[in-house]
Amino acid sequence: MRGQFLRGFFRTFTHLELSEERSSQLWDEILQRQQTLCAASGISVSLLTAMVDVFTSSNLFQFPLLIEREDLKTLERNAVTDALTGLHNRRLFGETFEKELNRAKRYTQPFTLVTLDLHRFKEVNDQLGHLRGDDVLRAVASTLRKSLRTSDSAFRLGGDEFALLLPQTDAPQAFALSKRIGIIFADVLRSIAISIDVRIDHGISTFPSDGDAMDQLVRIADERLYRLKHANHDQDASDAEAPPQSQSIPPPFSRPGRFRNLRRGQASFYTRLGPSFATA
């Protein structure tokens, strides 16, 4: 047990793979080296200092890097966190997606992906500046934190593109959540006084009705989002030429989200979204 614990300990702090026997030997050397250094210097020498000395003199590494456990946790957290919004980043998206999809298959539960992006966000950057654009992106993150359950996950994939992973959530529930996100986002924007009417668009795909693989679900959510983006652009153009009219609620699976790698014209293959979906 001692050797097993020390092996894990050294792996955490030095990223070295050592045998249990070698780990025990090194630990004894470190304790002895600490005593020797304290006696020689007349001051208290930390265990970390003795560890560096032993590992360096043993040629186990030439460029020592030892960090405290909390610092290591911080580094790991920062590696999967978007610096601007504090949401999970693209790096964690695929890993979490596969894990939740496998869980949904194992327990025969629905699982929904929502892709999100911002309608008229480019106008904010162009007319008001990128600092105000950053305010809008942070407003999205604040909105998502207020709207989601602890079991849900939100990601910033880049630019104004976001995604939600919703375990144990079917399509109608995801659409209701998307409507709620839009309402909360409008309130948050009013608090930061953005003069441009930025809105969140979305595309939704659900396991198992839309597919059972990650690439299928991402593609379908992208296509539904793409359709809505163009519908909104067309609506904006009509509004500029016609008297104001009351807006109807968008059909299911057409609200916040987009991935920019979607090729133009893909959505034309989907004139109908399926028996349970409203047509465009």
Image (cartoon, grey):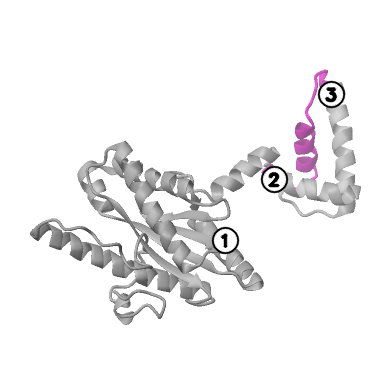
Q: Is residue 159 visible?
A: no
Q: Earlier in the sequence, mark 1 or mark 2?
A: 2
The kind of residue on which mark 3 rests is: Cys
Nearest the eye: 41 or 174? 174
Q: Earlier in the sequence, mark 3 or mark 2?
A: 3
Query: What's the residue at 90%, 40% (across, down)?
Result: 28
Judge whether residue 275 is colored magenta: no
Instruction: Residue under label 3, please give it.
Output: 38
State the residue lying farthest toward the top: 42
Question: How packed is label 1: few (under 14 Cα within 10 Å), some, or many (20 or more)?
Answer: some
Extent of the magenta region = 41-64
Residue 244, position as x, y percentages in the image: 14, 56
Which element type, helix, strand or loop, lies under badge 1? helix
- Closest to the camera, between mark 1 and mark 3, is 1
Q: How far apart are marks 3 and 2 (CA)?
A: 24 Å
Query: What's the residue at 37%, 77% (across, down)?
Result: 273
Instruction: Residue under label 2, please give it.
Output: 62
Instruction: Residue under label 1, please give it.
Output: 96
Q: Do the residues labelled 3 and 2 touch (CB within 8 Å)?
A: no
Q: How far apart are marks 1 and 3 (CA)?
A: 48 Å
Number of numbered discs present? 3
Nearest the eye: 200 or 15? 200
The kind of residue on which mark 2 rests is: Gln
